[in-house]
Amino acid sequence: MALDARARARGVRLGQSLSDARALVPDLDCHPADDAGARALLLTIAAWCERYTPLVALDTAPGRDHGLFMDLTGCAHLLGGEAALVADLEARLCAQGFHVRLCLADTPGAAWAMARYGQGRIIPEGAHGEAVLPLSLSGLRLEPALVASLGRVGLKTIGCIAGLPRAPLAARFGVRLMQRLDQALGREAEAISPIMPVAELSTERRFAEPIARQEDISQVIAALSSGIVEPLERRGLGLRRCRIRLFRVDGHVSGLEVQTARPLRDAKMIARLFEERIAGLHDDLDAGFGFDLMRLDVVHADPFEGMQAEMMAGNSAGHGHDALVDRLGARLGLDRVQRLVLADTHIPERSFGREPVARLAAHPGARRAASGAAALALLPDLPTPDAIITRPLILFDRPELMQTIAEVPDGPPLKFRWRGVSYEVARSEGPERIACEWWRDGRGARSRDYFRVEDRQGYRFWLFRHGLYGRETSEPAWYMHGLFA
């Protein structure tokens, strides 16, 4: 499946049977192939390579050894140029125990071919076309069967087909051959698909000496938070989701992400959210031998609208509430910070629900409008003051079955037994009929007749008869649903 340079130097080749390889090299060191483990390792390396560029993609060419693509456009100057970046990348990976073959070229196709079949490490701008011509056709990322077919007619290198008429080649060997050739030579653009979504904004800090102390990490997070505010202001945005990436010197990458209930542009608040997030881990960050790079990425941002400050306190209206939601969300998860909302139903136990507070509109202006619209929509369904009095202060999650004695089958109860205690009814009010929700509970659902009753000691109860006598059932059941103060 794979071999290193030492095995190749002693005559071992890819695809060779293990017995033949051991006949050539009796002391051959072999290990079972682990595709899942190799992919997990490659993803770990890809995450580490984001220290150089956020555009890192997996090479998924079928039937080929997997590698990585990195788009370094606009990033090389951060490390002193292309030569310094390539040298730093190779040195760090070799220090971690990897054997590396890499090449920097104008196109992904040319870089792929030169890294595997060429000798150059950095191809000068515009020279990639000439550089790939002497290489084998396998450098075009073609299927082995297609390469063998081309070899049988004497076409063995990229230069052999670069100057031939395109139509006959495409007709005989397929358009895939021409597409791969054009991608390698730069005639056709080829986009790579980054593993991680590209951040809208990003700021980072590199260190000459790795840092490991929690206090130093917090100070850097505060500095990065301050540095991201000015770009957000220029664009009129406030962040909703951001993450800190911590690159360890041994190649491990840690990530922390926070979300906000509203667009945020306060550096101190951003830093505090990350402190809450770290505190929520219930353990210190594993710094190992230290972090030599930290990056703050704004994953998602929304338009930011200024809010009227309070005259006396000097704070924005609602700031305390939003700050509390953000802090709780950073420690517990924003989806777990919920609020009660009214539900469109007449069944008492279904008349409310929960939803995350952060599910409100994206920015303050839209949130205020949405809240106003919600209030207008719910006002007609809100109970009147008289109706509020008829509802108990204590409502059970589930109605509890009870036994009753009534004068007539559809009248109020005279006596009832609930939780092992008998009660004698002194007075009652009702019924208040609530129809069933057949679209939820099916055609066999029953209506409810609610009564407000008071016993001889003055205790008040809210109970109902489940099912209309003679129409829905011949033996309706009785349930206790709530208690009045």
Image (cartoon, helix red, strand yellow):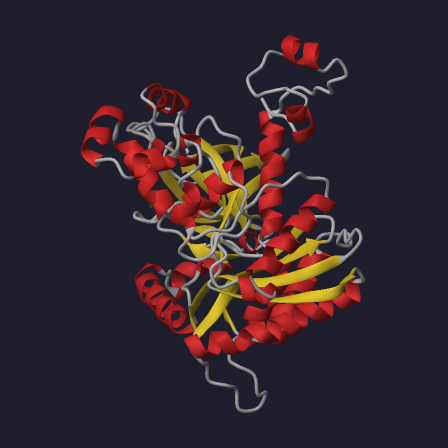
* Left or right: where 234 falls relative to 420: left
Image quadrant in which you'd find residue 228: bottom right
Q: Residue 60 appears at what percent x and percent y? A: 46, 35
Whether residue 161 is situated above or below residue 304 in the rendered picture: above
Residue 436 shows in the view: no
Whether residue 373 is situated above or below residue 484 in the rendered picture: below
Q: Residue at point 40% right, 64% down? A: 361
Q: Residue at point 62% right, 24% down? A: 34
Residue found farthest to the bottom: 311
Location of the N terminus by quadrant is top right
Q: Residue 89 appears at what percent x and percent y? A: 63, 52
Location of the C terminus by quadrant is bottom right
Count of number-bearing discs: 0
Residue 144 shows in the view: yes
Q: Residue 4 appears at what percent x and percent y? A: 65, 29
Q: Residue 436 appears at what percent x and percent y? A: 33, 38
Whether residue 148 is situated above or below residue 448 in the rendered picture: above
Foreground: 365 or 94? 94
Q: Residue at point 45% right, 51% down? A: 352
Foreground: 475 or 240? 240
* Left or right: where 441 falls relative to 301: left
Foreground: 265 or 71? 71
